[in-house]
Amino acid sequence: MSGPFAFPTDAMDLDKMLESIGGLGWDGLKQQNAPAKVSDRFEPDDQLKIMMFAFSQTAEGRQLFEWIADLTFRAPYPHVGNTRDSAWLAAKAHEARSAVGLAVMQAIADGEKILNNKRSQAHEKPS
């Protein structure tokens, strides 16, 4: 016999199959694979910013944050291949890597501002 032939059993509908293995169906599967909810600017809270600034003022903290800077925004531009597509990919990789380091450094700078504001407000309060 040549050509396609019928399977001995009918294929199960995709939604039914997904419901049988997880009970969630297609929408549940999409929901499970959705990206995590994060804030738009990926900003840590004020307490973490203050802690990062305080840690950056120690020798160990300074060394850690210098290393993070070297790995991220100070890193050389990645090798670009011969095609325009490889240049685009290299640019996006460098941009993403740099954004992480800049976000860390921005959090440190914000922590310093917050701490200085708290200190100045404490000195301004009449006793």
Image (cartoon, rainbow, N blue to C red):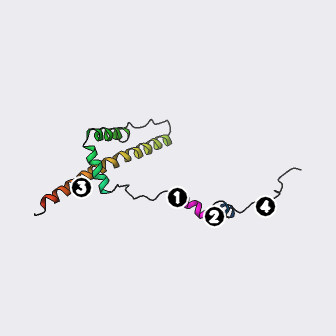
For marks 4 and 2, give the CA distance: 21 Å
User: In x, y percent, where is residue 67?
Assistant: 34, 38
N-terminal label among 4 and 2: 4
Identify whether 18 is placed above or below 98.
below
* Residue 52 in magenta stretch: no
Q: Which mark is residue 23?
A: 2
N-terminal label among 1 and 3: 1
| Other residues around mark 3 within 10 Å, as few (<14) / some (14–19) / many (≥20) | some
Residue behind mark 4: 10
- Name which residue type carries label 4: Asp
Q: Residue at x 31, y 51 (%)?
A: 107
**What is the quadrant of residue 22 in the picture?**
bottom right
| Nearer mark to the viewer, of 4 and 3 | 3
N-terminal label among 3 and 2: 2
**Outermost residue to the front:** 127
Q: Residue at x 55, y 61 (%)?
A: 31
